[in-house]
Image (cartoon, rainbow, N blue to C red):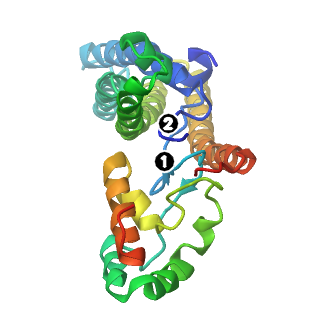
Amino acid sequence: MALLRAPVPLGYGHASKEAHSIAAPLLTGAALALAGVVAAADKDKKVFYWPGVSLLMLVATSMALLASIQLHYYSRQFLYSRQDIHDWYDLDDSPGHQAQVVELYEWQGDDYGKWERSNDWAVHCFNTGTVLLGLGVVTVLIPPDGGQQAFCRWLAAGLVLLCTVAEVAWTLAIYRKNTQLREERGAKLTAVAKPRENA
Amino acid sequence: MTSHAMTLPGIGRIAPPGATDCRGLDCYAVIGPAPDGDTRDAWHATFQGGAPAMDIYLAQYNAEFGARHGANCQFHDLPPSIHVACAGNYRALLDELEWANQARFGIAG
């Protein structure tokens, strides 16, 4: 039956949880700490080329990552498996429980849709946040006019910018890859299902 | 997949944009996005013409997606717009099937 719905690949839910509940808070903390450094910099000694732009980028990073955490927490309540249903409800295969099982399976599929939509918004926020963080770090690294070790700072800024561009390309690629995988595996599973007499 | 492996390369979306999973028996097809012209109202309007009008509509808009459904899928004769509109509401999909069957056969689904 496809009353129940499941992520493709099946481990996506766990992976997503780690990104939004472990990586996102850490990156939020890093962005806010760096914003604090930029904000507290001595105005007389020009340390950063664009302190205002850097602050804007880093604060925007924090907001995007916080949004991803919040959306993830909201969405996570809607992701559960068939096993969870049977763990929480005292149901067996008897005809007396059949209607309840079908009802609970319908809800699982409907709730999965809510998780899918909210989690994808969390994903967009997380990816936006990491890209903004990269750009924020680039603006922090760009040396001010007459700054010390300008060459190394330019080199570091270029490296971070390169990685940020690579991340954007990679993210756009896996957006397509994940949805294609869902279509391919769905088609294969459907194709191997044998016809039922009472269908 | 570990968390650090996802932190730098980003994380992929899970929902195909504008599409949804079919909820039919043994059917795991991804249906949608609905083609231009295929809307819930347009589908409902064909009910007045009965089975011939519905078949013409399905031939026009469901030809690509109809073949994706499983052999046991009860929703294979619903156009993609209905699948997409009923995403996240299985009961609404059942209601649509019942209305379509009533229009086609004059019976409840």
Decide: is B41 above or below A60: below
**On the rendered image, what quadrant is the N terminus of chain A found in?**
top right
Residues marked 2 and 1 touching at CB (< 8 Å): yes
Question: Closer to the camera, B14 or A147?
Answer: B14
The image position of residue B75, as x and y in percent, is 49, 59
Element at badge 2?
loop
Total number of numbered discs in the rendering = 2
Return the chain for callout 1.
B
- Which amino acid does the dot numbered 2 rest on? Arg
User: On the image, which quarter does residue A108 sit in?
Assistant: top left
Q: Which residue is mark 1?
A: B23
Residue A135 location (% of width, % of height): 46, 34
Q: In this rendering, is residue A33 above or below A51?
A: above
Q: Is residue A189 left or right of residue B90?
A: right
Residue sitting nearer the eye, B46 or A165: B46
Q: As rendered, which of A173 and A157 lies closer to the eye? A: A173
Residue at (35% x, 34% y) in the render? A103
Q: Quadrant of residue A169?
A: top right
- The chain containing the residue under callout 2 comes to A
The CA span between labels 2 and 1 is: 8 Å
Classify residue A163 by image quadrant. top right
The answer to whether residue B89 is seen in the rendering is no
Residue B33 x/y as whole percent: 48, 63
Of tags 2 and 1, the one toward the viewer is 1
At a point 62% along the width and 70% down the height, the residue shown is: B64
Instruction: Report crowding for label 1: few under 14, some 14 to 19, many 20 or more residues within 10 A (C-alpha).
Output: many
* Same-chain check, marks 2 and 1: no
Residue A35, percent from left and from top: 31, 19
Tell me the tag on residue A5. 2
Residue located at (52% from left, 57% from top): B74
Q: Please, what secondary structure does the residue beneath circle 1 have?
A: loop
